[in-house]
Amino acid sequence: MERYEKVRSEICEVCRLLYDRGYVVSNDGNVSVRVAPDQVLITPSGVGKGRMEPDMLVLCDLEGNILDGDRYPSSESKMHLMVYRERSDVMSVVHAHPPLSTAFAICRRPLKERYLAEMVVGLGEIPVTEFAMLSTEEVPNSVKPFVHDHNAVLLANHGALAWGPTLLSAFDRLETVEQTAKVFYYVERIGGGVEITQEQADTLRAKAGMYAKLAGKREG
């Protein structure tokens, strides 16, 4: 039996969701889950997410040393591992190239206007990193300034990256980035929107705890 069999299956399921929704094509994107304080399961290089199999995943430590698996980890594993090193509360990182999010990243256009109540309560502003050469230390270094105060970023001329306390929360955040980009695109095509006021935004943020409670199981 493979180590972390259930987690491996869940990663493959999320990979197929990314592919089915058109957030990745070919070998795009990468997904990882922290399975121990200093160990991460991550998708390998060179395999399409729509055909990912559990035994293809690679187990690494937080320095990128391979602990288990017969493939090479994703060439972008450095940015995943940086997030885990910086944020002990993060349990999953998801990277993809959703079309509109990536278009905003190419335009170096952050998603910052307070147009959506859900964005104010959930993701907050989605900044754009500096351009970083793929598969180098430039990539994690470009993300690092944002990792403590944000839940997702747009990677300049590259795509989107999201992280969270569970695999599905990281996927949901990435999907929300793409949905937000779609809404912003339509708002700009229509001629510009009206932002939620700062006072309204503060009121919404004060409700975050209530929404978190409602998302859990009901007691009693």
Image (cartoon, rainbow, N blue to C red):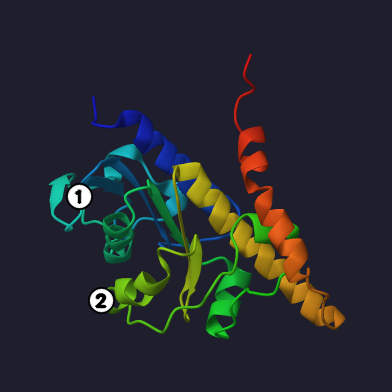
From the image, tell me which residue sits under label 1.
Answer: 60
Q: Amino acid at mark 2?
A: Thr
Q: Is residue 23 left or right of residue 88?
A: right
Q: Earlier in the sequence, mark 1 or mark 2?
A: 1
Q: Amino acid at mark 1?
A: Cys
Identify the residue at the far right of this view.
190
* Residue 6 screen position, x and y as percent: 37, 29
Q: Say which element carries label 1.
A: strand
Residue 173 lies in quadrant:
bottom right
> Which residue is painted at 52% across and 46% down in the image?
169
> Which residue is painted at 60% across and 30% down in the image?
216
**In front of the other: 166 or 12:** 166
Q: Say which element carries label 2.
A: loop
* Residue 160 screen position, x and y as percent: 50, 67
Decide if residue 170 is in sight here.
Answer: yes
From the image, tell me which residue sits under label 2.
Answer: 136
> Which residue is painted at 59% across and 82% down in the image?
109
